[in-house]
Amino acid sequence: MKKRIGSYPRVRVEGGGRGVVSQAGAVLLVETVRKSGLDAAISAALEPWRKARAVHDPGKILLDVALAVALGGDCLADVALLRAEPAAFGPVASDPTVSRLIGELASGGKQVLAALRTARAEVREQVWRLAGDAAPDADGQVIVDIDGVLVLAHSEKEHAAARKKTFGHHPLMGFVDHGRGGSSEPVVGMLRPGNAGSYTAADHIEATQLALAQLPKRLRRGRQTLIRTDSGGGTHEFVAWLAKRGRWLSYSVGMTITDAIHQAVLKVPASAWTPAVEPDGEIRDGAWVAELAGDCLTGWPKGLRLVVRKERPYPGAQLRFTDADGMRLTCFATNTTGEAIAALELRHRQRARAEDRIRAARATGLRNLPLHNTAQNQIWLEIVQIALDLLAWMPLLALTGAARLWEPRRLRLRLFSTAAQLVTTGRRRILRLAGHWPWTDVITDALDRLQALPNPG
């Protein structure tokens, strides 16, 4: 009988190994930075804040932190992950240098934020050109989802406040939807106090302005740009701003079920209800939609269409007082004409993808705001957005098939965490990935696609 030694093989561990690079799969993000021109754009944007005789470029420092966040870091000190691998990431600044830069950028206020956002917008347009038919605006329309995020705080940070039995901040985030075949990329991250209201029209207007500024100029006004929100955007001021003459934006915003809407729903005849549909065109079981008219449209901009959906609640779900006849009611408003209400309702329901993007953002530095001052945490929020940009642009430019839909945690587990052997031959350095790793081909094929793209400028 063999002596049992456990379920796993026993190995001997020693230090002092050479020629091995951890997080070698992160070269996918590094190559995305290079091909998109993000490094040059951020460095140029932060050039006014570079001190004379400084050793480290502020743009490189900020990008290093963003790369660390993309790899799973959640504080400034996690840049040590890159510092340990100079062969893959180059020289990385020390922790004190990183902290000093964040403090200096925070003191720069709106000028720093404007410089970073302008650089990101320029690079975004370049990435969409490189993406071609896979770009979010390839079909002539772009969808921007605006939604609030609750970020908990476990200490007395500046502007942290109580909200919904929690304590923290309530930033507004915006994402460009890549559709069913991709993920999305952030276009706004506006830090707000924890007690900021969900229905604050001024905040939604400012967030939408910042989001539009991230799009190519041709998409900053006109019906081809759709702004999609939950019921927090269903206010008279925000809808009127979206529909204002000269702006002409399309919108699809959730609406609160008021008493007027509730009474209008009760008057809808049975023949006016249309079955809701699924993305594949099949009828959605137990769900119907109808368009409302009458007094419930009074006071809203001309051209607004009010669409309501009734659906059988899930077993065990508790009905609200705004529901009717045992059906769960939801409502949204849109100014899109010429489309069936079932298609419009499906389009609005797909706003749920924004919740997936928020989950990905929480896994990419937004689980908490690690700094004390609001100005510093706003810089952190910009870093998080850069990290999310890279996690969206790399699959957009380099991955195909199911891999394009992988969320950050899966990208880290399967691709970025891959180790490799560093081989130096002549003047070239080569990373040799393990041949038995199941996703080595995914990494090498993606790198080939990135390297085949034209260099910026």
Image (cartoon, rainbow, N blue to C red):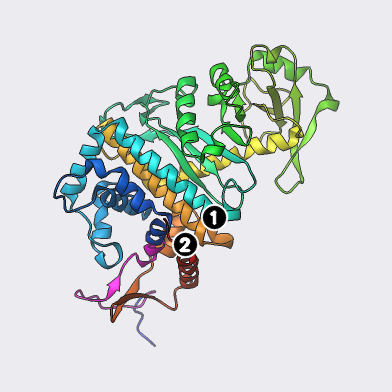
The earlier-in-sequence mark between 1 and 2 is 1
- Please, which residue is most extreme toward the bottom here? 1
Question: Element under label 2?
Answer: loop
* Structural distance between the alpha carbons of marks 1 and 2: 12 Å
In the picture, measured across the screen, residue 387 lies left or right of residue 85, that is: right
The residue sitting at 34% across, 54% down in the picture is 67
Residue 144 visible: no
Looking at the image, which residue is at 56% across and 38% down? 218
Q: Amino acid at mark 1?
A: Ala
Magenta span: 7-28
Amino acid type, label 2: Pro
274 above or below 81?
Answer: above
Comparing 378 with 438, the one in front is: 378
Question: Residue shown at 37%/44% (left/top)?
Answer: 384
Q: Secondary structure at mark 1?
A: helix
> In the displayed structure, would residue 17 be above or below residue 102?
below
Q: Is residue 20 above or below residue 240?
A: below
The C terminus sits in image quarter: bottom left
Residue hosting label 2 = 454
Q: Which residue is mark 1?
A: 131
**Count of labels shown?**
2
Residue 331: x and y in percent read 66, 26
